[in-house]
């Protein structure tokens, strides 16, 4: 669907994650509209408006995320993260339903829609649950009808889409030809821009058809072939290893999702650090608060130059400094921006007579370096794992995958070990894959658990096996406390629909609710919940009210499902066969 807005010099980029609230904290606008409106406000007014950007990353970086986590707006004020995400989702819902109604010519009811929200695979359970809570709050779906919303993992969506690709929809860096009848070219960048031009000329209609025809690429994939999807977005980089199972083409995950906060935002941070080095941290901090709209402007100017960076570039990149930057700097420091640039010991950045920052290509490339180094290091480590041998293809997807600097770095790292494939509309790969996933969520049959999950239990104390400090004597029986009862281990394969069964008994017959703490660890095996690296990460709640029975000992059988994108729990009272309301919560602390 076409969004309004966009920047000069940047085609088909994704809408920025920006949102604007009025001074009384009501939703005003999202994306370019938010950015442009905020930008046009008078500084005396704009300081009362709440403008937030790049807020999706906060869910990944917040260690103890909860329903009450705060975000900071550009003017320094705090807002509830849940409200911001709910506002954004409500806006998407409205836009999508309007578009559907326009296309079909009839009213479209929300209950007719199955919604899919994509999140990075390396997000932990609390972040996924947070998204779901925001969806409930926004009215996207109701708590009573949770299956109307599916949480999809971004690299999985990309993987589902990539295996359906026809070769003419891809750029194959391995053979250096664009599979489009173009002449081979030694330079990745020019092949890419030719291909883009070709795509631009053949712009399809705005809705894409889901082709069930298996593309030609697929014909090269054989039973058991393995491929890696590297999803490089704005905030995170996510790596997923899949294996194909024929004939249906189901997918099986071979190694737990890995990655980290190495998205293209890292380059923006480096640019900010460079500005601090030239103009002083004190000035930049002040400028961001006092002239937030001009700061946004400067970052937009940087964004379009960032996209022009390429390994073989020789001419400098010019970045427009907003007038208020130049003006405010003079007031703040008492000397000119030009003077600051001359005095600073940053050799690669000069002042151009047209009032621009002139960066030579090495300076720009050095801003990319830390982020790209992280990604390459991660890929190198991944390829050393025994489960990740013989990788046939590496799919490079996500907005950052368009960067020729990143493409070249991945190519140099692989040295021909796998073919690198970049879908043409690389920024839309995940979106399209998410639609395919929503149509058939069962296509991914086996996943790997990212963490070890379990609960603390009492076991009979065994001399010589259990540490004496864990001994508890109760009614003459010797128990060992804090034993970690593992539900599932990190990196363990778990099939879709596979259940982990446990039985729990209420401590007293009158008990209404059983609350069990769920623990998790990055390590594959844990013996006790008190070990280092084991932390409490959630609670399992069994609501046993109204199921009182005459049975001497009530047994509640609990089933937990770990093979899906979210962890679910169900429970049954064994003596009566009644369903017990079970929920597993990762957000309350």
Image: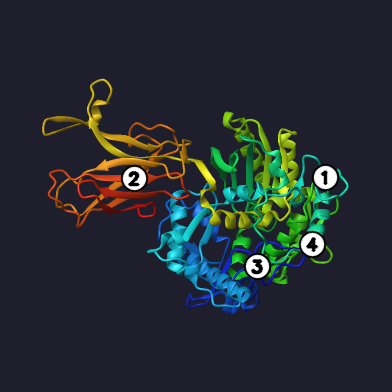
Q: Position of residue 314 (x, y in %)?
A: 85, 50
Q: Callout 3: helix, strand or loop? A: loop
Query: How far apart in space, not on screen, are marks 2 and 3 (Cα)?
Result: 41 Å
Q: Is residue 242 above or below residue 211?
A: above
* Disc assigned to residue 177: 1
| Circle 3 residues within 10 Å: few <14, some 14–19, many ≥20 | few
* Disc assigned to residue 202: 4
| Circle 1 residues within 10 Å: few <14, some 14–19, many ≥20 | many
| Circle 2 residues within 10 Å: few <14, some 14–19, many ≥20 | some
Query: How far apart in space, not on screen, are marks 1 and 4 (Cα)?
Result: 19 Å
Tell me the residue that label 2 is attached to. 559
Residue at 85% x, 50% y is 181
Tell me the residue that label 3 is attached to. 1
Sequence order check: which comes first, mark 4 or mark 2? 4
Residue 130 lies left or right of residue 17; in this view the side is left
Query: How far apart in space, not on screen, are marks 3 and 4 (Cα)?
Result: 17 Å
Residue at 83% x, 66% y is 354
Q: Position of residue 241 (x, y in %)?
A: 59, 39
Residue 360 lies left or right of residue 221; in this view the side is right
Q: Which residue in the rendered view is the most extreme toward the top?
A: 464
The quarter in which the N terminus is drawn is bottom right
Foreground disc of the pair 2, 3: 2
Residue at 73% x, 38% y is 419
Residue 504, visible in the rendered structure: yes
Q: Position of residue 230 (x, y in %)?
A: 64, 45
Q: Is residue 59 above or below residue 390?
A: below
Sequence order check: which comes first, mark 1 or mark 4? 1
Q: Callout 4: helix, strand or loop? A: loop
Sequence order check: which comes first, mark 1 or mark 2? 1
């Amino acid at each position: 669907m076409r969004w309004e807005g966009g920047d000069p010099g940047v085609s088909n980029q994704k809408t920025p994650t920006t949102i604007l609230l009025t001074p009384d904290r009501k939703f005003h606008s999202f994306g370019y509209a938010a950015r442009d409106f905020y930008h046009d406000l008078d500084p005396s007014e704009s300081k009362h408006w709440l403008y937030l950007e790049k807020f999706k990353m906060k869910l990944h970086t917040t260690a103890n995320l909860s329903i009450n986590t705060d975000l900071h707006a550009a003017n320094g004020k705090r807002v509830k993260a849940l409200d911001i995400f709910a506002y954004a989702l409500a806006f998407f819902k409205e836009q999508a339903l309007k578009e559907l109604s326009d296309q079909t010519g009839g009213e479209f009811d929300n209950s007719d829609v199955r919604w899919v929200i994509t999140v990075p695979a390396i997000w932990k359970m609390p972040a996924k649950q947070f998204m779901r809570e925001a969806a409930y709050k926004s009215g996207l779906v109701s708590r009573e009808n949770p299956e109307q919303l599916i949480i999809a993992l971004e690299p999985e969506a990309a993987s589902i889409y990539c295996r359906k690709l026809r070769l003419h929809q891809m750029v194959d860096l391995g053979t250096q030809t664009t599979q489009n009848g173009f002449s081979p070219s030694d330079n990745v960048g020019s092949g890419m821009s030719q291909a883009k031009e070709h795509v631009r000329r053949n712009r399809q209609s705005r809705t894409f058809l889901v082709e069930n025809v298996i593309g030609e690429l697929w014909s090269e994939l054989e039973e058991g072939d393995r491929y890696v999807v590297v999803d490089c977005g704005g905030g995170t980089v996510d790596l997923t290893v899949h294996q194909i199972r024929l004939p249906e083409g189901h997918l099986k995950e071979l190694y737990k999702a890995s990655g980290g906060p190495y998205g293209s935002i890292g380059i923006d941070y480096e640019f900010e650090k460079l500005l601090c080095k030239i103009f002083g941290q004190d000035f930049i901090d002040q400028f961001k608060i006092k002239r937030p709209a001009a700061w946004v402007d400067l970052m937009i100017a940087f964004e379009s130059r960032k996209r022009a960076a390429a390994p073989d570039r020789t001419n400098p990149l010019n970045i427009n400094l907003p007038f208020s930057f130049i003006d405010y700097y003079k007031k703040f420091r008492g000397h000119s921006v030009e003077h600051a640039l001359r005095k600073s010991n940053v050799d690669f950045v000069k002042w151009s007579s047209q009032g621009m920052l002139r960066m030579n290509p090495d300076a720009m490339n050095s801003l990319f370096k830390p982020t790209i180094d992280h990604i390459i290091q991660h890929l190198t480590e991944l390829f050393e794992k025994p489960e990740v041998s013989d990788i046939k293809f590496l799919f490079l997807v996500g907005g950052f995958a368009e960067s020729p600097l990143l493409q070249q770095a991945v190519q140099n790292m692989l040295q021909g070990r796998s073919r690198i494939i970049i879908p043409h509309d690389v920024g839309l790969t995940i979106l399209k894959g998410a639609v395919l996933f929503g149509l058939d969520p069962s296509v991914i049959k086996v996943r790997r658990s990212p963490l070890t999950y379990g609960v603390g239990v009492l076991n009979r104390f065994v001399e010589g096996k259990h540490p004496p400090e864990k001994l508890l004597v109760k009614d003459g029986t010797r128990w060992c406390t804090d034993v970690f009862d593992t539900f599932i281990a990190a990196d363990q394969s778990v099939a879709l629909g596979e259940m982990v069964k446990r039985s729990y008994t209420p401590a007293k017959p009158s008990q209404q609710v059983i609350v069990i703490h769920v623990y998790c660890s990055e390590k594959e095996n844990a013996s006790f919940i008190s070990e280092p690296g084991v932390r409490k990460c959630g609670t399992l709640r069994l609501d046993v009210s109204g199921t009182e029975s005459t049975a001497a000992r009530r047994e509640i059988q609990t089933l937990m499902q770990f093979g899906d994108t979210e962890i679910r729990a169900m429970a049954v009272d064994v003596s009566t066969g009644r369903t017990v309301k079970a929920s597993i919560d990762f957000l309350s602390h």
